[in-house]
Image: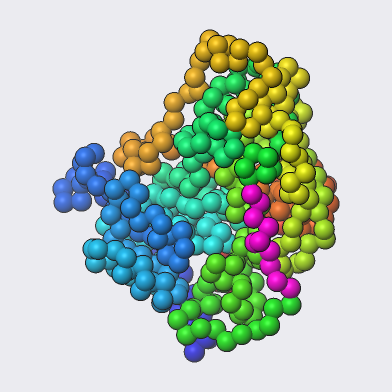
Amino acid sequence: MEKEHSQSRRDFIKKTSTVLAGITIVPRFVLGGKGFLAPSDKLTKAVIGVGGMGVNHFAYENTPVVAICDVDKKHLAHAAGMLKNKVKTFHDYRELIQLPEVDIVHIATPPHWHGIIAVDAAAAGKDIWCEKPMTHSIGEGKRVMEAMEQHGRIFRLNTWFRFKDIFYGMGTTVKPIKKLVDSGLLGWPLTVRVGKHTGFDWKFYWVGKEHLTPQPVPQELDYDTWLGPAQFKPYNKHRVHQTFRGYWDYDGGGLSDMGQHYLDPIQYFLGKDETSPVLVEVDAPQQHPDAVGTWRRITYTYADGCKIILDGEGKDTEVPYIEGPKGKLYPGFKSDIPDLERKLAAFPDPAPQITTFTESVKTRRPFALNERNGYHSCTIVNIGMVALRLGRSLRFDPEKQEFIGDEAANRMLMPVMRAPYTI
């Protein structure tokens, strides 16, 4: 049965690839006639992965759900029951993305699936709302960027602190922080410290278990498809669903879970949306090859001397969030710069951004956090994970987007995917 299932999956991939290669898919809202969607009309969406975050986003921006997909029958049935309208349900996302009535695909699977699904959905003419982290590797992120450009798609990464909401312990949105940094009142270069003193939690409960005992696969779960491109490991319930973040094959613990929430706004206010750090240094116990562990400190350094310091131990307590040669900014937006509010009023606000995804989809203009700046903030996370797994500091080339003089690190730029999966 497994052999037949695998062969069927290979045939489906081959057939789908052939079809997509031979046609150009045009979204229904740019077509006239029956498929035309006026600017005032509703966009529709489909959600892939409805066991956790997926069901939390059924109602966003008044976009009705018309289809859902999951490899766990219980998840699928539960999610379908939450929706008032009748929706189409799928086991295989490749069937779902062919639906002409779907405008937006929301990807809420474990991260090792993000890149593949995003690329396939783009080729199928869908715009994409993706959970963080954007991708599980740097190489997959590059392919997502290429696919969005190749197929003219609109992409949104689902972390939002660069453009709305109070930014954890800072007591403000990111906007005045960006304005302060741009003003030059703090000087340059800057050091940013990310830790418990500003309300950041690295969630070290997302650690994996070593030497897992193989268990029978639940009848409702297609474990082979859940693994997808990841290398085969015997099933244990701790690998999947709510605890998958503790295993390198699928995620990267708290760093991967929360990293883009914390680091994307820093990238934004430091003006690093088009570049990457040149050095990452790690202080951590030796990591297990399968199970994610904890870490004490990760330090990123940029070519201009700016630093981002991640405190995993909670030792940084009375330190500023941002420090420069001319001033400091503490949690609660407190600063040692006299009369800061009056001084900031003389400087311009940051450039406006599109912060409603449906507006981006309808106007075909990039969302505030898209595949390009999202790729770079995800790269900060991913180079940190590579350094942790190898247990050493690494130098990185921001232009080539590869590690310098380290073959082992560069082999981790793109994971080896289990056949027949590819990106």
Write the residue at 61% across / 80% down: 235
> Closer to the camera, 345 or 196?
196
Residue at horizontal 44%, vertical 30%?
353
Q: Where is residue 57 in the image (x, y as percent from the top left)?
A: 39, 54
Residue 250: x %, y % from top left: 61, 64
Looking at the image, residue 359 sits to the left or right of residue 236; the answer is left
Horizontal side of residue 101 vs 22, given as left or right: left
Q: Where does the image place residue 21, in percent across and percent down from the top left?
A: 42, 58
What is the quadrant of residue 294 in the picture? bottom right
Q: Residue furthest left?
A: 33
Q: Which of 40 and 122 is in front in this view?
A: 40
Q: Give the range drawn in magenta.
A: 201-210
Quadrant of residue 328 in the image? top right
Q: Main secondary structure of the magenta part?
A: loop
Identified at 76% across, 67% down, the residue is: 289
Q: Is residue 180 among the parts visible in the rendering? A: yes
Outermost residue toward the bottom? 1
Answer yes or no: is residue 90 visible.
no
The colouring scheme, among rainbow, by chain, secondary structure or one colour, is rainbow
Vertical placement of residue 200 versus 414, above or below: above
Above or below 330: residue 342: above
Q: How many labels does the image show?
A: 0
In percent of width and height, residue 174 lies at 54, 31
* Above or below: residue 162 compared with residue 297: above
